[in-house]
């Protein structure tokens, strides 16, 4: 540091959208890297809301131990939010409010850690800053268990949720296999993924052949046909003795109706019952096929399961955090550090800068050739892509009380 | 072995009822310990069914590596079943069928790995053997995530499910805390436990004070009063900003109706929807309080989660397996190796022989003083009891593919 000039201004970091098992690893890397360069880091409380409300947290008080603890703590330590800014024209007042907060704290670097929407917001903020001649470098930092960001090979957060999914499905399949002779014959596991079947596809890593669970995966990329599905379940039970189904929450029927919306029905007390895909499918299997069925809906558990985080994912999350700071200090305005895959096996990757405008309003779909021809499984191409992302175990440290030593901050 | 006489006859091992993350660790210990004494081990395929149908697996083909892999593989490698034999009078023909299989294979030691029902079956078999003057030593080996066996301090399988529960609840609580300002305010987690709230209680280890999740635990030991519950949720959300609820599947209202039976209602497609406690509670919170709610139902995931197994539990599971063989060879007929706690802190325990007749038709309830006075949390007494049981991480080995190296046997 001795020969370098300390960069002017403050770095503002904010978390956005659904949190993940490793978004705090990105935050920790941002803070640590900024310190190396002598840059002060403020973090917005509850994402962009904190910027709008001038509610910022000074991270200078975090010790080295605290930063390390932050890196292995799931959730979003500074708070996140689901607030989407509209276009510059429609939401101009709010964008100007952001600039106001930046001015007040001499923020010269804005790092926005989120998905598509956040990339879009970061891009618009950078445009507005230029318009107002305010010296600001905006960086989008990738994060989402949905794995649907364009340009980047994968999204930090996805690999850990994918590992959780594949491991959980293999485990419950071993349970069902043991019980099937006299008890549960069908098990339905509901995976997150409203628009794309990335996590459902990851479940496919639990088995190596059609007789190994998951026997049937239901992707949102394929129309859900109940008759075809039930016939397939029946066939698997007859062949294997039991059937493990992984269903993406986003599956739709031929009319484009989400099966998950079957929930919101009425339970036998006459009250609203929040359902989902798994409870619906389980009901149909029991009703039509007369088979004993169990089902699981891990919901947030799958995206917060830091205890089974993928080491690849953890390293990705830290790398994009470090690079985001480096890109910011280099003035690479309106970019995002993205993961570029160099080879599948051995798995090699690097982080590159990509323009936010290529990411902001795009959505990466799962490639067509990742889904098996019968629509119920994954291909070798999918395996080659997915497998490195769940590799390695980045375990958190545990205390004498048997619990992970997750940090407890008072930020939110 | 040189000076010892090889014991006469074969040892038959069978798994019974719902499987756990560590029942195979018990099986592996049984096989390994029997080999030390030169005793051949047969395992029944699909529990007692295999004995009734003379469908036995010779474990001699298992290598040392195979036995080690068995020890860290969840589920029941030999298959389990849900078949309860009735009284000796009512089911005499089937009991005699068991003896027939024993005679055929010169079985002198019968180890039945299960819960209350299995202890009862083992006891009855021993009575019948004596009646027929057949030389047989029957041992019940404890196992159940329900933790409801009498005499033993705890049941192998429970500690790992408890650890899964506490860790998962802490993780999803961190997620909800980050999102609560603009999104999910209430999260409901459904824990197994139809008759006793042991696993729901274990969730209490995730927090240390009333403001830490889980904020509300619903025990089957307490009457579920909707108005009181909803008022409590509302109060927590106002005080903390969000509320994490852990509900035992066994909660009942004042009329003794299981809330879980609210499931089996009709979804908006007009079809049967399998529900449960969490989906019902989530529906009520949304409908009455108007709060955004998410819910999770891990179901089998909680009892098969070998990836987060408790080391204490793993050691218990192995110890009861080893001791079961030793007790069998000593002729301690109609006993069960039970875990006796010597002290909480430091946690010390040993395995003792207890008469099956004290265990067979009993059910251990959770002590009254484990539930907080307001009915929504656990006491310090509960913590002292539960904490040692989730201590330590007995991780399975992982492969280069990022998946646990669970054994794949062709037994079932």
Image: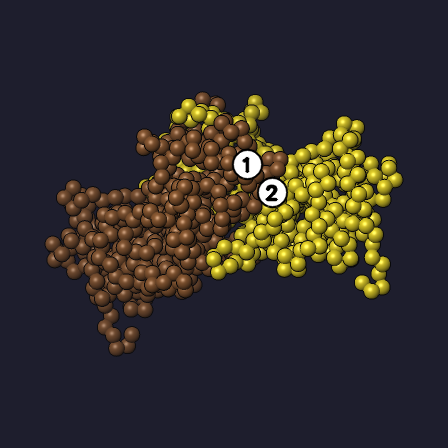
Chain colours: A yellow, B brown
| Relative image position of residue B347 (x, y in whole percent) | 39, 62
Q: Is residue B101 visible?
A: no
Helix, strand or loop status at disc 1: helix
The chain letter for the residue carrying disc 1 is: B
Do residues under tags 1 and 2 come within 8 Å of each other at their CB atoms?
A: no
Q: Nearer the viewer, mark 1 or mark 2?
A: 1
Mark 2 Cα-neighbour bin, 10 Å: few <14, some 14–19, many ≥20? many
Residue B178 got which mark?
2
Q: Position of residue A191 (x, y in %)?
A: 53, 39
Circle 1 residue? B238
- The alpha-carbon separation of the residues under discs 1 and 2 comes to 16 Å
N-terminal-most mark, 1 or 2: 2
Q: What secondary structure is found at the residue carrying circle 2?
A: helix
Give me the residue at 55% from left, 27% from top: A258
Q: Where does residue A71 sit, x and y in percent of width and height?
A: 63, 54
Q: Residue at x 40, y 25 (%)?
A: A269
């Amino acid at each position: 540091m001795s020969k370098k000039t300390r960069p002017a201004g403050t770095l503002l970091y904010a978390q956005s959208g659904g949190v993940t098992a490793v978004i705090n690893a990105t935050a920790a890397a941002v803070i640590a890297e900024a310190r190396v360069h002598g840059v002060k880091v403020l973090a917005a409380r509850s994402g962009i809301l904190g910027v709008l409300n001038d509610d910022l947290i000074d991270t200078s008080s975090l010790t080295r131990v605290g930063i390390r603890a932050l890196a292995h703590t799931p959730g979003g330590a500074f708070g996140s939010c689901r607030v989407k800014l509209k276009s510059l024209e429609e939401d101009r007042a709010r964008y100007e409010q952001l600039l106001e907060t930046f001015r007040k704290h001499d923020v010269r670097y804005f790092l926005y850690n989120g998905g598509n929407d956040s990339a879009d917001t970061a891009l618009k903020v950078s445009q507005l800053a230029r318009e107002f001649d305010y010296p600001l470098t905006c960086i989008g930092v990738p994060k989402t268990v949905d794995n649907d960001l364009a340009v980047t090979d994968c999204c930090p957060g996805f690999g850990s949720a994918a590992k959780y999914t594949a491991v959980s499905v293999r485990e419950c399949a071993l349970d069902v296999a043991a019980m099937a002779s006299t008890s549960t014959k069908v098990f339905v596991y509901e995976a997150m993924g409203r628009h794309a079947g990335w996590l459902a596809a990851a479940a496919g890593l639990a088995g190596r052949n059609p007789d190994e669970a998951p026997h049937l995966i239901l992707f949102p990329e394929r129309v859900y046909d109940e008759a075809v599905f039930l016939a397939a379940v029946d066939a698997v039970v007859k062949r294997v003795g039991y059937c493990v189904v992984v269903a993406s929450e986003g599956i739709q029927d031929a009319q484009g109706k989400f099966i998950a919306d079957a929930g919101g029905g009425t339970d036998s007390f006459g009250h609203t019952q929040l359902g989902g895909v798994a409870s619906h499918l389980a009901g149909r299997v029991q009703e039509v096929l007369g088979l004993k069925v169990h089902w699981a809906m891990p919901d947030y558990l799958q995206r917060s399961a830091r205890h089974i985080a993928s080491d690849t994912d953890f390293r990705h999350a830290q790398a994009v955090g470090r690079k985001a700071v480096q890109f910011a200090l280099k003035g690479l305005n309106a970019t995002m550090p993205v993961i570029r895959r160099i080879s599948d096996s051995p798995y090699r990757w690097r982080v590159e800068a990509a323009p936010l405008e290529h990411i902001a309003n795009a959505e990466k779909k799962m490639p067509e050739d990742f889904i098996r021809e019968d629509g119920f499984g994954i291909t070798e191409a999918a395996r080659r892509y997915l497998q490195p992302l769940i590799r390695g175990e980045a375990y958190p440290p545990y205390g004498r009380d048997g619990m992970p030593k997750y940090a407890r901050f008072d930020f939110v």
